[in-house]
């Protein structure tokens, strides 16, 4: 890969924007929280804490993982992104073709070293979880797989992007599974499906124009909004079956459900209006993350 000195600043900036900095915490946080719990904080039979494993995992899921997830997407979605008015900011980079090759190389260079170290630090179960996580990242956008164009599988794969770092964290720490822990993971997974589905609503017209399938293009904007609303409530109910602070965290799904409610009767023609709700969703994540963090801290100090 040859990059001239003059082009380096713009290429680095393009890579930075493509990695979606506003979303970095959405993958690093699940890993960090799950690893801390699985290593002995609140999970019976925890496998023990390793600072090296923790730091390597956090850094990986903070930046390289997101560059892979979004960078691959931006490269292979270029033609459709040209027709999407949302692209070109925090909601999605519009990568010039001149940096496509550099982006794919950057994904390889930043991901492979971390993955090798994480494999050396883990065991069979963590290897399996990490493989599923990386496969989901690639399969979502890469030619020949393109799970993002397979309705319903698109939402399942997207949810896997955010849940799998947590599952990997638990496996790497050697934590023991319980029914209550399964309830938390199920809730997180259903929340991810709801969030992706609602995010797809705003792109119904652009996706149809570009010949791209999604859960929203198949069942329509109105049905997808209602699916997201119900799924958020299901996620909240699942958390009620978990141990403290799970039931407290169940309250966190309420803002998400209320956020999609104004578009209960949204038509396909007006689907782009849902972008206002998606922008609120991005900030609700930070507020919800703060509440969950406070609950986890309280849990740690009482056990």
Image (cartoon, helix red, strand yellow):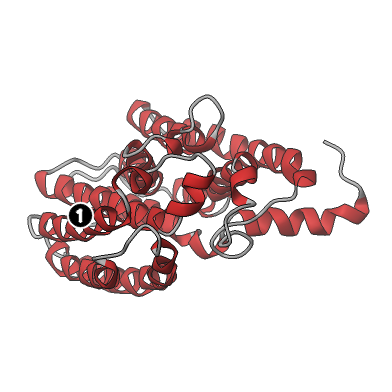
Q: Position of residue 169 (x, y in %)?
A: 36, 45
Q: Is residue 39 left or right of residue 239?
A: right
Visible residue check, residue 39:
no
Give whichever of 88, 115 is nearer the camera.
Answer: 88
Residue 177 lies in what quarter of the image? Answer: top left
Residue appearing at x 48%, y 27% in the figure: 145
Q: Is residue 124 above or below residue 292?
A: above
Give whichever of 249, 254 is nearer the camera.
Answer: 254
Q: Position of residue 163 (x, y in %)?
A: 33, 47
Q: Considering the numbered disc 1 on the image, is that residue within a helix, a strand or a loop?
A: helix
Quadrant of the rendering where the C terminus is positioned: bottom left
Quadrant of the rendering where the N terminus is positioned: top right
Residue 244 lies in what quarter of the image? Answer: bottom left
In the current view of this chain or complex, which residue is farthest to the front?
269
Instruction: Say which residue label 1 marks.
Output: 231
Q: Is residue 103 above or below residue 247?
A: above
Q: Position of residue 66 (x, y in %)?
A: 54, 50
Visible residue check, residue 38:
yes
Residue appearing at x 42%, y 72% in the figure: 276
Residue appearing at x 10%, y 58% in the figure: 237
Residue appearing at x 24%, y 70% in the figure: 261
Q: Is residue 76 left or right of residue 146?
A: right
Q: Position of residue 278 (x, y in %)?
A: 41, 66
């Amino acid at each position: 890969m040859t990059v001239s000195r003059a082009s380096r600043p713009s290429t680095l900036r393009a890579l930075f924007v493509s990695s979606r900095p506003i979303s970095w915490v959405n993958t690093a946080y699940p890993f960090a929280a799950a690893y801390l719990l699985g290593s002995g904080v609140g999970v019976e039979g925890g496998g023990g804490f390793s600072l090296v494993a923790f730091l390597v995992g956090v850094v990986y899921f903070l930046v390289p993982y997101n560059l892979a997830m979004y960078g691959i997407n931006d490269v292979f979605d270029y033609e459709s992104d040209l027709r999407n008015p949302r692209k070109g900011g925090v909601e999605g980079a519009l990568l010039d073709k001149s940096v496509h090759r550099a982006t794919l190389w950057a994904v390889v260079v930043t991901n492979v070293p971390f993955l090798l170290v994480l494999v050396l630090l883990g065991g069979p179960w963590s290897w399996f979880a990490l493989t599923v996580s990386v496969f989901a990242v690639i399969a979502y956008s890469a030619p020949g797989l393109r799970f993002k164009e397979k309705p319903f599988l698109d939402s399942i794969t997207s949810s896997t992007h955010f849940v799998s770092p947590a599952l990997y964290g638990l496996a790497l720490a050697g934590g023991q599974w319980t029914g209550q822990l399964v309830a938390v993971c199920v809730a997180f997974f259903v929340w991810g499906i709801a969030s992706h589905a609602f995010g797809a609503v705003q792109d119904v017209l652009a996706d149809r124009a570009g010949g791209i399938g999604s859960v929203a293009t198949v069942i329509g904007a109105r049905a997808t909004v209602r699916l997201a609303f119900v799924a958020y409530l299901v996620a909240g109910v699942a958390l009620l079956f978990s141990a403290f602070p799970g039931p407290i965290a169940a309250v966190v799904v309420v803002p998400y459900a209320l956020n999609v409610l104004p578009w209960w009767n949204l038509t396909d023609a007006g689907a782009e209006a849902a972008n206002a709700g998606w922008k609120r969703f991005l900030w609700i994540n930070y507020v919800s993350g703060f509440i969950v963090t406070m609950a986890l801290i309280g849990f740690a100090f009482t056990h």
